[in-house]
Image (tube, rainbow, N blue to C red):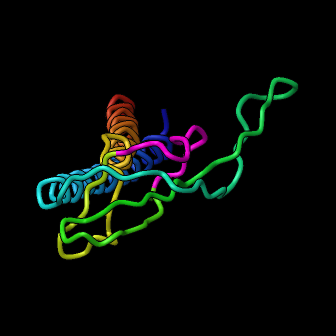
Amino acid sequence: MSTDERKRFQVVGVGLALIGILLLTGAAWYTWEALTFWRTTERTDGQVVELVAVGQSTIGRGADATIVQIYRPVIRFTDASGREIQFRSQVAESDPPAVGATVAVRYPRDDPYAARVAGLGPLMGGAAILAILGSVMFGAGWLALRRSRALA
């Protein structure tokens, strides 16, 4: 193989590996932030009071495609000092909890308006996505670098 092809594999490999490292760093930061939030917040139950439509998504292809509505639940809870707090979930979903459903909530005692739904998906979903993408990108970069060495 030519030197140009080898250099192309090297450039692509380094680029993909660097992108992978950045994504994995983002996943580590996201995980640290979520675990810190979990350790430093209060837990209580809240009630879904409204479902706000935020968009649509298509599931499937062609004639089998289905358009589904995406919602962000609005949740109301009472904090430790007795104040009633209402917030919109950060996570949008096509199958949200029904209005009136009880959901677990975590909130900082000093800023209850920064509340989040307390679940593995809402707290760690972003970290998982970044970790998977970072691993794939880093792995592809590593394979490209190995290929460039094999062409030497």
* Residue at (24% x, 69% y) in the render: 82
* Mark count: 0
Q: Is residue 101 above or below residue 60?
A: below
Outermost residue toward the top in this view: 64
Percent coordinates x, y for residue 79 in the rendering: 25, 65
Which range is magenta? 91-103
| Pick the front one: 102 or 144 | 102
134 drawn magenta: no
Q: Is residue 146 above or below residue 89?
A: above
Residue 14 visible? The answer is no
Q: Main secondary structure of the magenta part?
A: loop
Q: Is residue 125 above or below residue 115?
A: above
* Residue at (35% x, 60% y) in the render: 77
Percent coordinates x, y for residue 122 in the rendering: 37, 48
Residue 77 visible? The answer is yes
Q: Quadrant of the C terminus?
A: top left
Percent coordinates x, y for residue 124 in the rendering: 31, 46
Q: Is residue 12 above or below residue 2?
A: below
| Pick the front one: 118 or 124 | 118
- Left-right relation of 80 to 151: left
Outermost residue toward the left in this view: 39
* Residue at (21% x, 59% y) in the render: 33
* Residue at (41% x, 60% y) in the render: 76
Give the quadrant of residue 114: bottom left
Outermost residue toward the bottom in this view: 110
93 drawn magenta: yes
